[in-house]
Image: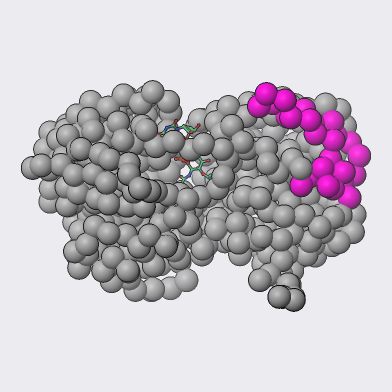
Amino acid sequence: MEKIVINGPSILNGSVKISGMKNAAVAVVFATIAVNDECIIDNLPNISDINLALKILEKMGAVVEKIDENKYKIDTRPISTIMAPDEDVGKMRASYYIAGASLARFGVCKVGLPGGCDFGSRPIDQHVKAFEAMGAKVKIDEGYIDASVVGGMKAANVYFDCVTVGGTINAILASVRSEGVTVIDNAAREPHIVDLANFLNFCGADITGAGTDTIKIKGNKQLHGCEYTLIPDMIEAGTFMIAAAATGSELMIENVIPKHLESMTSKLSETGIVFEEGDESLLVKRKTTELRPINIKTLPYPGFPTDMNPQTAVLLCCINGSSRINETIFNDRFRYVNELKRMGANIDVDNGIATIVGGQRLRAANVRAVDLRAGAAMILAGLVAEGSTSIEDIFYIERGYDNIVEKLSSIGASIKKVQIQDFS
Ligand code: EPU
């Protein structure tokens, strides 16, 4: 086992290149099951969730070939089972996309319930509602999503009772080969939903409205493979934005779509941080004035992302005065707060709202990554704290950040991975 050790405080400089988006990549990789052909996917991030997704496809019979570090050829034609390996699907959230994709292709699925980060209850009732609207009989039984439909999935009108990224993706996947037009209302609008729709359209699907709250899918049984390049990861970019802002550094963030970052740049500008947008880059300028505290509410896209809640808390710890983060998506997202308190943070959480009184320098400490984004926040805290911070349970961080230690080290951070001695 390894841990990350950071010697802070750090000043960052130079430029960093953002990798492909995790949450688009997991959707597109599992969507290849529905496509039933050979696809070449480029800009896949080198993270453990993608390695696991590719392993699951291989175990189901797909032929997966690495073309280069971030480019894979995936041929799902040989898949003849709907059984995904239980020991693997429980390790990631996105494995439930196998359900939508298998229903589209085989009219049946049996997939173990997904794992992923623990932010409290993460129900899948809206996924089930969409599958049922399309004619499937669904049982959630003994840890499985067990569903089947006679004569293929039917076009339907699906109205989501809450805005759900996973539910929207599963509804698109399940309907992509059905006859007729499926309409999803109150759909999620995240860039990764647009990316999945673009990928499927390259494969011959007819999906319109992705990126708005009404998506129409005209089913097509004859999908074909394609070559597709994934969009860059806005949350990885946001994490580097905070790294620069919290350490008072100037940093060029390359390979981004600035439009996707606007929910973060507009809000964070209220602190006084200055951003300069290029065509495919964002410059975070070195701070020249004292930053101001702000109040943030997490919301579905284009609101401020819940996946930036923990990292932003670190920035707010560095700003004099009282800031607030109101978390409206996940009821247990503040599990990182106890770890930040070990580093001297003054944070009080009440009823889904964290009040952060910032201004005193964080202290180095031994902390844990309690989930993926919480782990990223611990790295950021280690960059601003004085002394040597060590972070355990870094497998969470490796699920979603491509070479984060190497990237930070290349822009001036004193950060490394070290082996933890096993005394057992
Ligand atoms: N919800 C329901 N019923 C459902 C589905 C969702 O009540 O059937 C609720 C959830 O409990 C939550 C809200 O709806 O309160 C939003 O959940 P959503 O379905 O949008 O989340 P998700 O699909 O499980 C994805 C990302 C998360 C990200 C959220 C919100 C993937 C694989 N995961 O999760 O990413 O936080 O959307 O944007 O795409 C991460 O990357 O660190 C991560 C956790």
Residue 92 drawn at (x, y percent): 46, 54
Towards the viewer: 394 or 20: 394
Q: Which residue is pictured at 34% across the width and 36% down the height?
A: 127
Q: Which region of the structure is painted magenta?
A: 339-363
Q: In the picture provided, is 227 more to the left or to the right than 235?
A: left
Residue 32 drawn at (x, y percent): 28, 56
Would residue 358 be counted in the magenta stretch? yes
Would residue 228 be counted in the magenta stretch? no
Location of the N terminus by quadrant is bottom right
Residue 86 drawn at (x, y percent): 38, 60
In the image, is residue 314 above or below residue 102? above
In the image, is residue 137 above or below residue 22? above
- Judge whether residue 207 can be spotted in this image: no
Examine the image and state in which quarter residue 183 appears: top left
Q: Which residue is pictured at 38% across the width and 48% down the height?
A: 143
Q: In the picture provided, is 126 more to the left or to the right than 134?
A: right
Residue 215 drawn at (x, y percent): 30, 31
Q: Which residue is pictured at 61% across the width and 36% down the height?
A: 332
Examine the image and state in which quarter residue 41 appears: bottom left
